[in-house]
Image (cartoon, coloured by chain):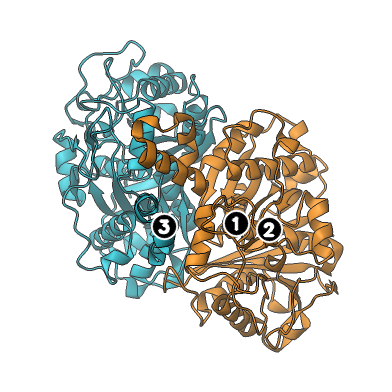
Chain colours: A orange, B cyan
Amino acid sequence: MSKRILVTGTGVIASIGAGAEEFQNALYAGKCGIGPSTNIGSDDCSGPAAEVWNFAAEKWLGKGIRTLDRSARLLCVATQMALFDSGLDREPDGELGLVCGTMFGGLHSITSFDWSGVVDGPKYVNPMEFPNTVINSPAGQAAIRHKLRGVNSTISAGLASGLYAIHYAAEFLRLGRAEALLAGAVEELCQESFLGFHKLNLVSQNGSIKAFGEDRDGTIPGEGSAAWMIETEEHARGRKARCAVEICGFGEAHDAHSIRSYHLRGDGARSAIEQALRASGISAAQIGLIVASANGSRSGDEMEARALASVFGGRLGEIPICAPKAAFGEAMGASGMLLAVTAGMALLRGLAPPTPGAGSVVSGLRLAQEVQPIEGEYALVNCFGCDGNNAALVLKRMA
Amino acid sequence: MDRVVITGLGLLTPIGSGKSQFWERLVAGTSGIEPVKAFDTSAFPVHLGAEVKEFVPDPHLRRPPEELGRASQFAVAAAHMAMADAGIELDRYDRSRVGVSMGTTSGEPLFVEQYNDIRKSDGLQSIPAQMLPKYPCNVIPSNVAIEFEMHGPCLMIPTACAAGNYAIGYGYDLIRTGRVDLMLAGGADAFSRITYMGFARLGAIAPDRCQPFDKNRKGMIPGEGTAMLVLEPLESARRRGAHVYAEVLGYGLSCDSHHMTAAHPEGDGAIRAMSMALRESGVGIGDVHYISAHGTGTPTNDRVESIAVRRLFGEAADRVPISSIKSMIGHTMGAASAIEAAACALALDTGVIPPTINYEERDPECDLDYVANEARTVHPRIVLNNAYAFGGNNASLCLARFEG
């Protein structure tokens, strides 16, 4: 179980940019990806969103994508980028697999398929659209697209799905079942999820995310996909792969409190962070960067601030924090992966990206609108959900 | 690493609830397939389904049942049964080291159906907010965690019709790596018109009965249900003096990477999953005494599965009985391989393997021993549980009789 797991390729597509370079440039420029939604497709609901703007999957994937829904396209793009970035696409001898985190899968495909049955009758539903109604459809489509014949798992743990997927994939490697895997996550923004955010009063009335802000009033729904190629150290070194970061310890804790509200005490969140530190064999003092789960929610951000304060104590004010959901929105099942990718980039640069819109922040947190230097080689990534799932992951910069 | 054993079983199936009723009816060859009651099938060319009959939410439920979707109600009820069966006293456990992993195809699809019904009758704005948080599929294991105040790992692995095996496999990993002391693992799916419409439109649903591997098989029968298994380290089962149904030896996962709905014609993915499960379990071809088939009853699935077993086992395949309980309980989707894993555990525990019912005429393309129509006493020592899914997701789980 002592195998080290390294990241050797990155792919990302979100509202602020597509591809590691564009995403990173936007992140460090403090760009915010939120704007008036265009893809929701209904007069009944519209509003600000962090969409993958002007998403044209054929730009990356070429032909043969007609039957892929938006979530499958996003995942195919991100996994392709990670695959190419790792160079493993040119070594086709191995059996690569894919672990994909998602909260809803192709929710719009599921709803539309049923809708056509309701409106036109069961005999008139399009059989070509049925495969898109299973939650593992994006992962299955990406496997076909990229010839991934190894493990193919889809992981759902609500807003924390992305981090759970990374951990599931890393464990698969540690247990010796594979030497390299794609770990990814995807979420599309669609009418149904968008409506859910609004109906449940989760959306900010001022149209922006003020992560940890004193005057925060909600989040903004987002979407996207990100993926890493991860490998055992032996495999990565053996092929002289470029290694960016190491995946260290993971922590997970369920609040067992409610499926629809954050547990303000933050017990689960604190426990997840502590487990991640312990599993990494490091102390809280060694963390040089915190990539926060904060999405502008009154209760969610309060819970996270409380958990951080109880883990880091008085030193919390010295550790740079960034809350990149303020840039790419609450991307649901994809959030954890997008946060982890952000943390990886920050460790490599030795700089924490700014958090757009950070104004008057709750006291005790070093969250800034400017780029901040990072001391040390470890970053903590938090990903907490209002359904009780709390996950935390520690990453380490490779020397 | 710790050895992992199964010490509790909870089930809700189309032929009965609880391990005793389920097993009694399963070995008797009982069919749970009847005309669909969940919705009107008059607009469909087929009318049969395998529903859980007369389900009433668990009386022990700690919250009002309407706060949970049907699949969650199933899962929580089965979890109560499994915990009672295993004799678990949760107060003796560190709750941060107790978890739940589940599989599903559709999660809580009835909320999508309600969404569309309301959208049609009254418009989108009339959709009630309180319905929405109950939909995401991970809410099912979350509801189990809430019911039992379990603070450990909690996740859904929605790998469609192979999901139960994935979830049990992950629970096994969490125990043997020492992350948890107790795991509830299984699957749940609720009868859904979405699934029914899809399979009907593909022409995959049998009009009269489910006849896996028979020459005249006409398709599968959609179903619903759940199975929850209590997994724990062997040491803790010993300490508690618990009854051990079976030991989990290992599992294998693979992807066809071929087609979203059709299996690889030569069964390549299925072979990789079975091989990986056997390799991880340290088990040879000749050691397998029974295979619980995915065996949906569709012409393609059963042919490909038979080919895969033949290719992997060679001549030894003639000596390995293989049966499909879907002939009796229909295809319970993401719950299927969890229910089948429970059946495998009971087969190992009792020495009896369940039959494939409605088997009448041999198909030259399916040339194995399908345990036709009558249960058989073979005292299996090692069994393999196969499951295949949309997306080309394949999972094989290897279980063994517990011999101390």
User: If the image is split into quadrants, where does the C terminus of chain A sit?
Assistant: bottom right
Q: Are marks 2 and 1 in contact (CB under 8 Å)?
A: yes
Q: Do circles 2 and 1 both sit on a common chain?
A: yes
Along the line of sight, the residue nearer the viewer: B158 or A196: A196
Pointer 3 local density, CA inside 10 Å: few below 14, some 14–19, many at least 20: many
Amino acid type of the residue that numbered disc 2 sits on in the rendered structure: Leu
Q: Who comes first in sequence, dot 2 or dot 1?
A: 1
Pointer 2 local density, CA inside 10 Å: few below 14, some 14–19, many at least 20: many
Amino acid type of the residue that numbered disc 1 sits on in the rendered structure: Gly
Vertical placement of residue B342 versus A25, above or below: above
Between the residue at mark 3 and the residue at mark 2, the CA separation in whole angstroms equals 24 Å
Q: Is residue A144 left or right of A23 when viewed as pictured? A: left
Residue at the image position 35 percent from the left and 35 percent from the top: A121
Could you tell me residue A96's position as x and y percent? 64, 37
Which residue is labeled 2 in the image?
A338
Between the residue at mark 3 and the residue at mark 1, the CA separation in whole angstroms equals 19 Å
Q: Quadrant of residue B61?
A: bottom left
Along the line of sight, the residue nearer the viewer: A250 or A211: A211
- Number of callouts: 3
Q: Do circles 3 and 2 both sit on a common chain?
A: no
Q: Is residue A393 left or right of B282 when viewed as pictured? A: right
Mark in the foreground, 3 or 1: 3
Chain under callout 1: A
Between the residue at mark 2 and the residue at mark 1, the CA separation in whole angstroms equals 8 Å
Give the farthest residue toward the top.
B364
Could you tell me residue B120's position as x and y percent? 37, 50
Q: Is residue B97 visible?
A: yes
Dot 3: what SS? loop
Along the line of sight, the residue nearer the viewer: B11 or A192: A192
Q: Quadrant of residue A316?
A: bottom right
